[in-house]
């Protein structure tokens, strides 16, 4: 095995050894075998491109192209042209998979299930890192910087893992990197011939043991020292990246004691969206409670308070140890009626949620495990991989029962709440402001405005609950929802909270579960399809207060019903079917979403955000142009080697037709009709033309043999090369004689005093080609036509022209510099 091939193999092995750190992140390792196979193909393409050889940028481009085709074949075969060429649908498929993979990473605990999205992220990441390592270490022959992408691959795995055997994966990755460095060192030293070293230490002679030479000994010492440092450093009390997305120490990293820190959560709306669109419902939580009003038994997971004009998400929060007794909720005073409620909650074995579902506001929690408390939202979050899987816990909560009069008489919210929870970005369309003003026209208090908004969405506005709405992106998405009046809980809660903020009412969005279904044994079952989102508005003296704008979902708060409100609203059901005593049924037809529709993104987003108005205007022009261009490329690009080869054969054999012409017709490289220059010897012109024509015919003959599998050997004389072609091609007369006659013509023009071109050499080449084709198998004949081996000369010609162009431009630039005043001064000073 050559040094370059060994280095290529070590590069792929080093990448795979670093990728083993990703194995604990998912519950199945079948993706790793796929990554091995695809990485070997990618490395093989690089080795073949370097053997041709191609220019370094072209080698990287070839590997990148093959990587894209491989990923398309594996992950977007149904959406690709011919199952491998990516088009707009395949690109959309990749975007959907990446989004789904990112959502799954944030949703599942380690080890996560091997979904298609996570599999694409794993395999795609390994191939990208492998391409970077191969490019640095093999193509550009600098293995030391290749450790950076390997370190990045290991760091991603270490940052998401839960510790334990991290040192083992680091040991494997470090061994791969050291192996790569050693392979590069041996490849470099081999170019110098015999490895040299210093004088041997100790006794010499026939019986002395022969140790490693100096460079190898030094490499081993460096490797052992680096490996030792790598194993010792993790034992030192240094900051470590642990805990994954959720962490419990001051800077958001490290093990810590949970005494402080921050939390930056992923958006839980992804889980909510998927839960509402599942094909088969599943029980998530089972409750036992002493509450007398199950219609208000909402289980809150997290609140979304960061609004960017497009969507809502959790902001970065401070976390602390779980207190024995929770503080009084912000803004709640003693005059508001409340009842202490105790609820025992059991999570399903498959349900791994980082945030703890609880009734709001909680006053105390008894739970095992590693949990942290976020005081602003009064939520609990798991630390260092802690989740709800199979847990049973006890929650004491307050059933706050404000009256309409108390809400209507609430004073202005405190400055800190107003500043954080009434912020609206400038990108929010003005139509949202105007619509909020129109809906609440005549309302005198913030409470009256909130009830008006709730009633508009749930009763009077003509909205319909539907999970099969069209989805898009853009800051005008809320405008589309207000126009179409179709959506599910996320759309309603988002819109109402945004409108409330435009009216100066502090608002946020809560995500969790609506009241579940009572069972005959006294328990309440909460299923995936009870997943829900609702707005919470802040009233000074009462605190954060739930509203329910989503029609047919959840329950209407008693303090907003007509008999206790200062507004006049139509009568409506107080509790939706999801909170009734009857077993919960499947949602309406509009609330379901098939797998095919999810692939088409028909119900995949948490909020319709498309500012475009849609329509049936036919296929857009840019899609037609894209498909037309793609069709041309698909047909033209594979045909380029064949077309180039046919053109080159035509030019070479055509030049031979003019070999018998007079001196005034024959010019260099087959030029015809070039007049003789004054004083030019016609015999010299004829000799030059003969040499050019005969060499062109000989080049065509050897390339023809190459196309049929007989590679050229530039070290042989024309006569020996002809014998080799006849032998390997198993040629008989008259083809064998044609080969020897062309070779004899080459020797004549190269060594005779007066070169002359024989007539009929083009016909000799055609005879040889017909004989080679007749003896070849049909795959060989097909390849010789469609993908001829000698077409690689086109790439060599481009490289030669590029080198010549660079030299020409460098010479021109040097001449321009020398003609400038400062260039002339430099020459004078040098002289």
Image: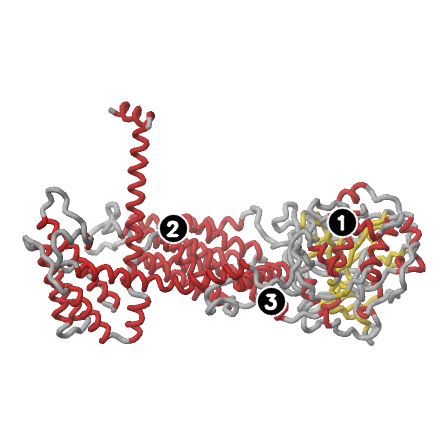
Q: Which residue is mark 3?
A: 599
Mark 3 vs mark 2: in front: 3
Q: Earlier in the sequence, mark 3 or mark 2?
A: 2
Q: Earlier in the sequence, mark 2 or mark 1?
A: 2
Residue at 89% in and 59% down: 569
The image shows residue 580 at horizontal and vertical percentages of 83, 71
Q: Give the CA distance from mark 2 to mark 1.
A: 50 Å
Asked if disc 3 and disc 1 are in contact, CB closer than 8 Å, the reply is no
Q: Give the CA distance from mark 3 to mark 2.
A: 42 Å
Q: Earlier in the sequence, mark 3 or mark 1?
A: 1
The image shows residue 638 at horizontal and vertical percentages of 37, 64
Q: Judge left or right: residue 565 versus residue 94.
A: right
In the image shown, does 689 or 588 lie closer to the viewer? Answer: 689
Q: Which residue is mark 2?
A: 143
Image quarter in which the N terminus is found:
bottom left
The image shows residue 661 at horizontal and vertical percentages of 13, 57
Residue at 80% in and 51% down: 436
Report the disc number at residue 376: 1
Image quarter in which the C terminus is found:
top left
Asked if disc 2 and disc 1 are in contact, CB closer than 8 Å, the reply is no
Report the disc number at residue 104: none
């Amino acid at each position: 095995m050559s040094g370059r091939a060994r280095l290529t193999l070590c590069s792929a092995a080093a990448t795979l050894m670093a990728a083993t750190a990703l194995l604990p992140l998912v519950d199945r390792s079948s993706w790793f075998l796929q990554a091995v196979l695809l990485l070997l193909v990618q490395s093989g393409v690089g080795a073949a491109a370097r053997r041709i050889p191609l220019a370094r940028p072209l080698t990287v481009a070839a590997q990148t192209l093959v990587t894209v085709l491989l990923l398309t074949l594996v992950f977007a075969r149904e959406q690709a042209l011919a199952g491998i060429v990516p088009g707009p649908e395949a690109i959309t498929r990749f975007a959907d998979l990446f989004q789904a993979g990112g959502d799954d990473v944030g949703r599942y605990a380690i080890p996560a299930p091997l979904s298609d999205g996570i599999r694409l992220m794993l395999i795609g990441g390994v191939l990208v890192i492998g391409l970077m390592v191969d490019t640095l270490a093999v193509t550009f022959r600098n293995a030391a910087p290749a450790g950076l992408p390997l370190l990045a691959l290991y760091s991603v795995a270490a940052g998401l893992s839960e510790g334990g055997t991290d040192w083992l994966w680091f040991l494997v990755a470090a061994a791969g990197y050291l192996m790569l460095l050693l392979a590069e060192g041996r490849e470099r030293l081999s170019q110098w011939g015999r490895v040299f070293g210093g004088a041997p230490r100790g006794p010499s002679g026939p019986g002395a043991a022969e140790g490693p030479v100096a460079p190898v000994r030094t490499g081993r010492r460096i490797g052992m020292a680096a490996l030792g440092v790598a194993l010792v450093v993790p034992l030192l009390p240094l900051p470590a990246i642990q805990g994954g997305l959720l962490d419990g120490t001051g800077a958001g990293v490290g093990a810590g004691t949970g005494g402080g820190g921050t939390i930056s959560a992923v958006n839980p709306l992804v889980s909510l969206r998927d839960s509402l669109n599942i094909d088969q419902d599943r029980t998530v939580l089972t409750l036992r409670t002493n509450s007398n009003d199950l219609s208000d038994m909402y289980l809150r997971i997290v609140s979304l308070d960061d609004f960017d004009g497009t969507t809502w998400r959790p902001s970065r929060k401070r976390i602390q140890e779980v207190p024995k007794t929770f503080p009084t909720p912000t803004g709640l005073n003693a005059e508001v009626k409340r009842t202490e409620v105790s609820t025992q909650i059991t999570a399903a074995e498959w349900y791994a949620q980082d945030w703890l579902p609880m009734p709001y506001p909680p006053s105390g929690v008894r739970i095992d495990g590693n949990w942290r408390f976020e005081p602003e939202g009064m939520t609990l979050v798991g630390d260092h991989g802690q989740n709800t899987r199979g847990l049973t816990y006890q929650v004491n909560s307050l059933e706050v029962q404000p009256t309409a009069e108390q809400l209507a008489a609430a004073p202005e919210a405190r400055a800190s709440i107003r500043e954080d929870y009434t912020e609206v970005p400038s990108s929010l369309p003005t139509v949202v402001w105007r619509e909020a003003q129109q809906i609440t026209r005549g309302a005198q208090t913030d409470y009256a405005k909130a009830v008006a908004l709730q009633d508009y969405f749930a009763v009077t506005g003509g909205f319909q609950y539907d999970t099969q709405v069209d989805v898009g992106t853009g800051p005008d998405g809320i405008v589309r929802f207000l126009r179409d009046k179709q959506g599910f809980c996320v759309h309603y809660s988002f819109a109402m909270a945004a409108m409330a903020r435009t009216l100066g009412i502090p608002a946020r969005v809560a995500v969790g579960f609506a009241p579940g279904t009572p069972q005959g044994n006294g328990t309440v079952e909460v299923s995936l399809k009870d997943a829900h989102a609702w707005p919470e508005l802040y009233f000074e003296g009462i605190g954060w207060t739930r509203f329910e704008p989503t029609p047919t979902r959840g329950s209407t708060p008693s303090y907003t019903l007509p008999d206790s409100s200062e507004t006049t609203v139509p009568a409506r059901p107080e509790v939706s079917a999801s909170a009734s005593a009857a077993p919960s049924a499947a949602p309406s037809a509009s609330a379901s979403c098939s797998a095919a529709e999810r692939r088409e993104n028909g119900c995949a987003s948490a909020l319709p955000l498309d500012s475009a108005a849609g329509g049936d205007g036919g296929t857009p022009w840019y899609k037609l142009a894209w498909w037309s261009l793609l069709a041309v490329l698909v047909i033209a690009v594979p045909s380029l080697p064949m077309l180039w080869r046919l053109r080159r054969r035509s030019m070479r054999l055509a030049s031979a037709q003019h070999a018998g012409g007079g001196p005034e017709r024959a010019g260099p490289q087959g030029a015809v009709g070039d007049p003789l220059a004054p004083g030019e010897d016609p015999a010299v012109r004829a000799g030059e033309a003969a040499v050019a024509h005969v060499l062109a015919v000989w080049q065509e003959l050897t390339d023809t043999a190459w196309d049929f599998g007989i590679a050229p050997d530039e070290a042989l004389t024309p006569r020996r090369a002809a014998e080799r072609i006849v032998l390997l091609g198993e040629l008989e007369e008259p083809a064998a004689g044609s080969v020897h006659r062309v070779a004899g013509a080459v020797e004549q023009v190269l060594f005779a005093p007066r070169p002359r071109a024989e007539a009929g050499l083009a016909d000799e080449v055609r005879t040889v080609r017909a004989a080679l084709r007749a003896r070849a198998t049909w795959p060989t004949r097909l390849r010789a036509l469609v993908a001829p081996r000698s077409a690689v000369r086109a790439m060599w010609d481009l490289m030669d022209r590029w080198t010549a162009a660079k030299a020409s431009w460098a010479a021109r630039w040097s001449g321009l510099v020398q003609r400038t005043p400062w260039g002339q001064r430099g020459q004078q000073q040098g002289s």
